[in-house]
Amino acid sequence: MKTRRFAALFLTLSMLLCTLPVSAAEGDDWLVPRMRDSTAFTDTAGTICETAADICCKAVLMDGVDSRHFYPESGLTHAQIIVISARLHCLLSGGTLEYFEPISLTGADWWTPYDGYLRQEIPSLAAEDPYVSMAQSPTRSCYRGDFLELLSAVLTDCGTTLPEINDVSAVPDCQDPELIAFYRWGILGGKDAYGTLYAQAALSRGAAAAMLARLIAPDQRLVLDLQPLELCQDLLGAAPETVLMTIKEQPITAQQFVPTLVSTCSRYNHSHFAAMMLELNGITTLDESIDTLRTYILCEELAQELELEITPSEIVYQTGYRGLTAQGQTWTEEHDRLLKEIQETVGTLPEDRLPEVSYAPIWETLDLSDIDSQVAGLPYWGGYW
């Protein structure tokens, strides 16, 4: 009796378990299929790179340096990035990596079939300087920006888009929509709290694996909480619309002043000789910045006399790019071009006509005594000679 009851109970539980949902297998929601089991690398175990390296190897976008090592800190060459990009394009297009087997090569030219594939599938690459430069220097280390630009070209050609999970329009050193898309998708987080891209920094195997893993696997994508870089507030403690001075009856706000201030400080921070000559002449970077603004306003006056117009900027600036406001960057860029046009027309500007400056009361409250070193510590503008 007890045996029959136990058997009936077992049958009931078995039927119930059969009706429960089965968890999705790893890779079922990946952008590209899982192709193989990965190797347990000894140098990624327990690190933040462990999962990323595992995903990339399972998708056959990357391989270990050998069966036990991934070497996440080492760099990637242009040739290796071309191979990764070709593999990704082939998989996103519905193909398999068996396509490359009949044309695989060994030796120094091992990567060229992948280059040929990309040129065939994305003909525009052959006319783009960044890719041509990469193909001409296959053993050179790849930069972060070059990798992302090629990755963007592959995704665009395959018609691949991802859900936007972050609201990002610019980071301190990038406002390129094609690259900002990687922040919006959660594939890229930048190298600091501001999300700074550092496009000209060398690309490590670990960083490439992290970006590719986030692209492939939705559960790896980043939800970002980037800190805004706001130089009007950070350097001056003033809101962008705050009027700091008046030059020939024209109010100059913090957002109009700061682009010239930081670019001037950065220029002299990066030129030892120029900084030395500035000091010998008894002029500070602050003096130089204000004189530049005086020149801008003089150019407006000369433009009226010459019947020239300030041509609207063709660049669409995003607030946050370089830590500046869109209005401040546009104003500065338009006046830079006006200055060049005036110089081409009249030659040397008449210094005796430079307008005087009348400072607003808030100017006396600003601490600009250490402005050069403050600028040196900023993303995008930072560093010394």
Image (cartoon, rainbow, N blue to C red):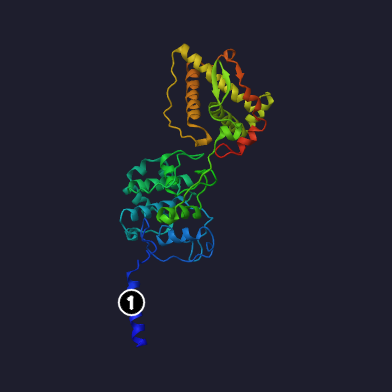
In this view, the residue farthest toward the left is 94
In this view, the residue farthest toward the front is 1
On screen, residue 75 versus residue 118, left or right, reads right
Residue 63 lies, with reference to residue 286, above or below; the image says below
On screen, residue 289 versus residue 69, left or right, reads right
Q: How would you rate the neighbour count of disc 1 (Cα within 10 Å): few for under 14, some for 14-19, many for 20 or more? A: few
- Which residue is at the front of the view, 344 or 163? 163
Residue positioned 60% across, 23% down in the render: 290
Residue 208 lies, with reference to residue 250, above or below; the image says below
On screen, residue 344 versus residue 125, left or right, reads right
In this view, the residue farthest toward the top is 305
Where residue 375 sits, quadrant-wise, is top right
Quarter that holds the C terminus: top right
Q: Position of residue 203 (x, y in %)?
A: 50, 50
How many marks the image carries: the answer is: 1
Q: Is residue 238 visible?
A: yes
Q: Amino acid at mark 1?
A: Thr
Quarter that holds the N terminus: bottom left
Q: Position of residue 122 (x, y in %)?
A: 33, 46
Q: Position of residue 310 (x, y in %)?
A: 45, 20
- Asked which secondary structure carries label 1, the reply is helix
Q: Which residue is mark 1?
A: 12
Residue positioned 33% across, 79% down in the render: 11
Q: Is residue 136 visible?
A: no
On screen, residue 361 versus residue 31, left or right, reads right
In this view, the residue farthest toward the bottom is 1
